[in-house]
Amino acid sequence: GQNPLFPRILGHEAGGVVESVGKGVIDVQPGDHVLPIFTGECKECPHCLSEASNMCDLLRINTERGGMLHDGHTRFSKDGKPIYHFLGTSTFSKYTVVHVGQVAKINPEAPLDKVCVLSCEMSTGFGATVNVAKPKKGGFVAVFGLGAVGLAAAEGARVCEASRIIGIDLNPNRFEEAKKFGCTEFVNPKDHNKPVQE
């Protein structure tokens, strides 16, 4: 953010079990399995009511916010001193406190240590491809970076039936795994003396 706020508990991706809920919360209850989401949904603003956007007026990404929305106060402290929230999720902690609009209820049989990537990596890469780029059937797609988000983007291109999915990464050890997500060919920029796009 423009005004860094420290100390704070970082982290934006996780899976967990609801321990307790605040007054008026009806969407989740103790025992529910959830994924925290840093781009939450109030379910009432024009963005939440639109299929074209997920940039909620209330819960959109805000790196500057260090407390809870309704009172601005943090729920974390050490030795009586505040420790601030991060992206409304603060997942690098055994316990966290989030706005109800920043959790998505999931099937309790889903293994939390595996589905946690759905709270960011998978939804970000896949969603960017399927919902934003929207490649046409038979089209060409280039994915820059074959980490978790890039692999999810490649999977989105595969689902959209792109005919060529070009994986671009400096680490050729990622190429074999990327085939499982739909990449059809690969480019390592280190192997060329021209810009990759050429």
Image (cartoon, helix red, strand yellow):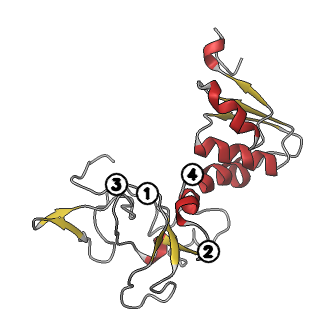
Q: Which mark is residue 12?
A: 1
User: Which residue is found at the position 25% from the left and 61% from the top?
Assistant: 84
Given the image, on which type of amino acid does mark 4 rest? Glu
Binning the other alpha carbons within 10 Å of mark 1 as few (below 14), some (14 to 19) or many (20 upward) gives many
Q: Position of residue 51 (x, y in %)?
A: 68, 67
Total marks drawn? Answer: 4
Q: Amino acid at mark 2?
A: Glu
Instruction: Name the element at disc 1.
Output: loop
Of the two numbered discs 2 and 1 on the same chain, state the one appearing first in sequence. 1
Image location (x, y in percent) of residue 45: 53, 74
Measure how far apart labels 4 and 2 are at the Cα level. Answer: 20 Å
- Is residue 138 positioned above or below 100 on the image? above
Real-space Cα separation, disc 1 to disc 3, in angstroms: 7 Å
Q: CA distance from mark 4 to mark 3?
A: 16 Å
Residue 30 shown left or right of residue 125 in the figure:
left
The first of marks 4 and 3 along the sequence is 3
Question: Residue 10's mark?
Answer: 3
The relative height of residue 85 versus residue 132 in the rendered view (above or below) is below
Q: Is residue 2 above or below residue 185?
A: below
Q: Using the image, determine if residue 172 lies above or below residue 195.
A: below
Nearer to us in this view, 132 or 173: 173
Residue 121 tag number: 4
Residues at marks 1 and 3 touching, judged by CB atoms closer than 8 Å: yes
Q: Is residue 40 visible?
A: no
Task: Please say if the residues under marks 2 and 1 sit with CB atoms less than 8 Å apart.
Answer: no
Q: Which residue is mark 2?
A: 109
